[in-house]
Image (cartoon, grey):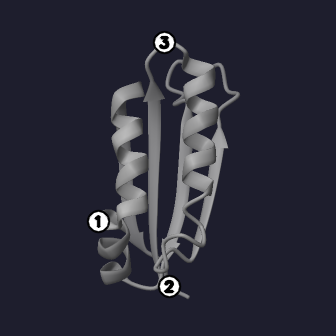
Amino acid sequence: MVVHIVMFQFKEAHKKANMIQAKQMLENLMGAVPSLKSIDVGMNFSQEDRAMDLSIITSFANKEDLDAYAVHPEHLKVVDFIKTVVEYSKVVDYVRDE
């Protein structure tokens, strides 16, 4: 199984509303993108300086399914929105033994 984790730092302008919209859009990918096995979307409550605003943890059967997700039209709609409201993001991809 492949795990794909992304953490986002949002711009200050309309931050809360944009986080809520991004969360909903990301959650809506479940069922819309066939290769997506699971998705967990969380909004941060930590006050630490190193904290990020929102994170996703997704899983896929294999790297090919992750690659298919990356170019899926529904995912690309979310990416287009997120690019306009996020300062930066961090990603981790790894294979988890089942």
Residue in front for this viewpoint, 21 or 8: 21
Compute the Cα span from label 3 to label 1: 28 Å
Q: Residue at x 64, y 57 (%)?
A: 40
Dot 1, crowdedness within 10 Å: few (<14), some or many (≥20)? Answer: few
Q: Which mark is residue 97?
A: 2
Compute the Cα span from label 2 to label 1: 25 Å
Disc nearer the start of the sequence (2/3):
3
As helix, strand or loop, the secondary structure at mark 3 comes to loop
Where's residue 80, x and y in %? 34, 42
Q: Residue at x 37, y 80 (%)?
A: 65
Q: Which mark is residue 12?
A: 3
Instruction: Say which residue label 1 marks.
Output: 71
Disc nearer the start of the sequence (3/1):
3
Compute the Cα span from label 2 to label 3: 38 Å
Q: Are marks 2 and 3 in contact (CB under 8 Å)?
A: no
Q: Residue at x 41, y 58 (%)?
A: 75
Which one is closest to the eye, mark 2 or mark 1?
A: 1
Which one is closest to the eye, mark 2 or mark 3?
A: 3
Q: Are marks 3 and 1 in contact (CB under 8 Å)?
A: no
Disc nearer the start of the sequence (2/1):
1
As helix, strand or loop, the secondary structure at mark 1 comes to helix
Indicate the quadrant where residue 32 lies.
bottom right
